[in-house]
Amino acid sequence: MSAAERRIETVRVELGARAYDILIGDGLIGAAGREIAARLPGARAAIVTDENVAARHAAALAASLEAAGIAATTITVAPGEKSKSFSMLEEVVDAVLAARLERGDAVIALGGGVVGDLAGFVAGIVRRGMRFVQMPTSLLAQVDSSVGGKTGINSPRGKNLVGVFQQPALVLADTGALDTLPVREFRAGYAEVAKYGLIDRPDFFAWLEANWREVFDGGPARAHAIAESCRAKAAVVARDEYETGDRALLNLGHTFGHALEAATAYDSARLVHGEGVAIGMALAHRFSARLNLASPDDADRVEAHLAAVGLPISTGEIPGELPGPERMLDYIAQDKKVARGALTFILTRGIGRAFIAKDVASSEVLAFLRTAMLPSGAG
Ligand code: GLY
């Protein structure tokens, strides 16, 4: 066993008969054949990946599967959100069927969130459900989208509106794959890492405040941050797999964040998901302080940390014009169920003390946005 392999951490997602392991460490793409063969003996595989990831990692994965005796076919899609479409779903389903894969065979998602969501949906519907392995290659996918079984595609009416819960049989997060990520993408994924500290792990948030530079540099600190994030998400998913309760806590920062993504027409030059979440988390803490639920010092602390790592914390940092507060409230209401003028938000009583607030008055949100969306970002 090499030194790199000895550093592999395992996080268990406790879901009864569908429990699975998340393995985190450097070199897992090269070790995939062995790990998959041990858990899915006799399975053949379809690797679903995108053109960018394929160029870097598909050959190594195919060689690793071949060495373990796993026959595999590779299906490559165009990179980007547009691949989460009905037409691409049909193409990938057809390629899996053309390869004559059976229910006991595996769909392997090698890539970021788009590939994981699309391939997981394919695994969920082909032959009424195939085995599924997640091999996330972005930080966002390693700490969030590859864990917990949400899969799907976009509809012209909105993002992620069509899909299934399809838990993977295994997640292999190769931390070495992050070495080639552009820093803006790594930073955006880091917003979700910080989120876990802010939800219910105040010690982890304090650790991130002290160690974020090492997390960005790579090595054991980065692997620890990913493992801790997966542990946090696994705990929430284990107690509420289908989001009837606590799983909604994972949406901290996402209500404001999704509205900002919609208001910027999902233009990644202006805002990517994690940046929207960073601004959203800053706003959720500031809004909680305004409602006298939490101390403004906590909102200051959140903003200071996110800004230190280079994430945006106010709407004024988004390039270009934004709609005004009234229109932003419409975007928020579109993303949420509105019951008699009240919205559900994830608010907080302090660092690591997030909770689900089901009765937030739209008028309160609007009043807050009028102050928070001032060019200074004050409020
Ligand atoms: N990304 C939120 C969830 O998996 O529930």
Image (tube, grey):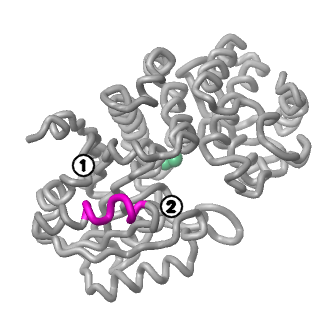
Q: Main secondary structure of the magenta part?
A: helix
For label 1, the residue is 28
Q: What's the amino acid at mark 2? A: Val
Q: Closer to the observer: label 2 or label 1?
A: 1
Q: In which quarter of the image is residue 298?
A: top right
Does the magenta-highlighted stretch encompass residue 259? no
x and y percent of residue 58 in the render? 32, 64
- Residue at coordinates 58% horizontally, 26% vertically from top-left? 309
Is residue 298 found left or right of 84 in the rendered image?
A: right
327 w.r.t. 69: above or below = above
The residues colored magenta run 53-61
220 w.r.t. 234: above or below = above
Is residue 361 found left or right of 225 in the rendered image?
A: right
Residue 334 showing in the rendered view: yes
Residue 114: numbered disc: 2
Q: In which quarter of the image is residue 165?
A: bottom left
x and y percent of residue 245 in the render? 52, 42
x and y percent of residue 160 in the render? 58, 62
- Residue at coordinates 44% horizontally, 48% vertically from top-left? 138
Does the magenta-highlighted stretch encompass residue 60? yes
Q: Residue furthest left?
A: 1
- Residue at coordinates 37% horizontally, 59% vertically from top-left? 56
Q: In which quarter of the image is residue 356?
A: top right
Could you tell me how far apart the alpha carbons at marks 2 and 1 are, in whole angstroms?
20 Å
Residue 357 showing in the rendered view: no
Is residue 12 found left or right of 181 in the rendered image?
A: left
Q: Residue furthest bottom?
A: 98
